[in-house]
């Protein structure tokens, strides 16, 4: 008997990309004094993008969207790959 598919559910990876787009919009609305420079954020994102703990746009070490953590001055890599 075929499995019943709930059409309201999205796959985890697709949902992650949609939510990541919203995260980028949210970051753009934050006060500049809470954010690192765009260059620093990009540097952090590059490290994340090559990390084996990255799943879509989510860090498996801490569960956050990397765009939040990479852009925040208070952001830290839970594996200490960047500060």
Image: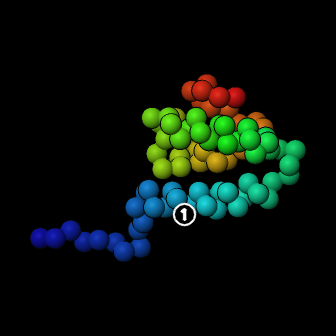
User: Residue at left 29%, top 71%?
Assistant: 5
Q: Secondary structure at mark 1?
A: helix
Q: Which residue is mark 1?
A: 18
> At 40% across and 61% down in the image, what residue appears?
11
Q: Position of residue 53 (x, y in %)?
A: 47, 36
State the residue lying farthest toward the bottom.
7
Percent across and percent down for residue 9 are 41, 68
Q: Is residue 16 left or right of residue 70?
A: left
Which quadrant, please, contains the C terminus?
Answer: top right
Instruction: Count neighbours of disc 1 (C-alpha within 10 A) and say few if under 14, some if 14 to 19, many if 20 or more.
Output: few
Frontmost residue, 39 versus 35: 39
Q: Residue furthest left?
A: 1
Q: How far across and how far down the image is residue 57, in percent? A: 53, 49
Q: Position of residue 48 (x, y in %)?
A: 56, 38
Tag count: 1
* Residue shown at 50% from the left, 35% from the top: 51
Q: Residue furthest front?
A: 39
Q: In the rendered view, does 56 fall on the left or right side of 48?
A: left
Quadrant position of the N terminus in the picture:
bottom left
- Residue 70 is at least partly visible in this image: no
Q: For this view, does 53 lie left or right of residue 78?
A: left
Task: Give 37 or 6, whichever is nearer the viewer.
Answer: 37
39 and 3: which one is in front?
Answer: 39
Q: In which quadrant of the rendered view does residue 4 lie?
A: bottom left
Q: Which residue of the protein is positioned furthest toward the top in this rendering?
A: 80
């Amino acid at each position: 008997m075929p499995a019943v598919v709930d059409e309201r559910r999205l796959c985890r990876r697709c949902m992650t990309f949609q939510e990541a787009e919203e995260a980028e919009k949210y970051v753009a609305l934050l006060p500049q004094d809470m954010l690192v420079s765009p260059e620093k954020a990009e540097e952090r994102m590059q490290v994340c993008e090559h990390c084996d703990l990255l799943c879509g746009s989510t860090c498996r070490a801490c569960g956050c969207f990397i765009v939040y953590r990479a852009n925040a001055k208070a952001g830290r890599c839970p594996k200490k790959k960047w500060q």
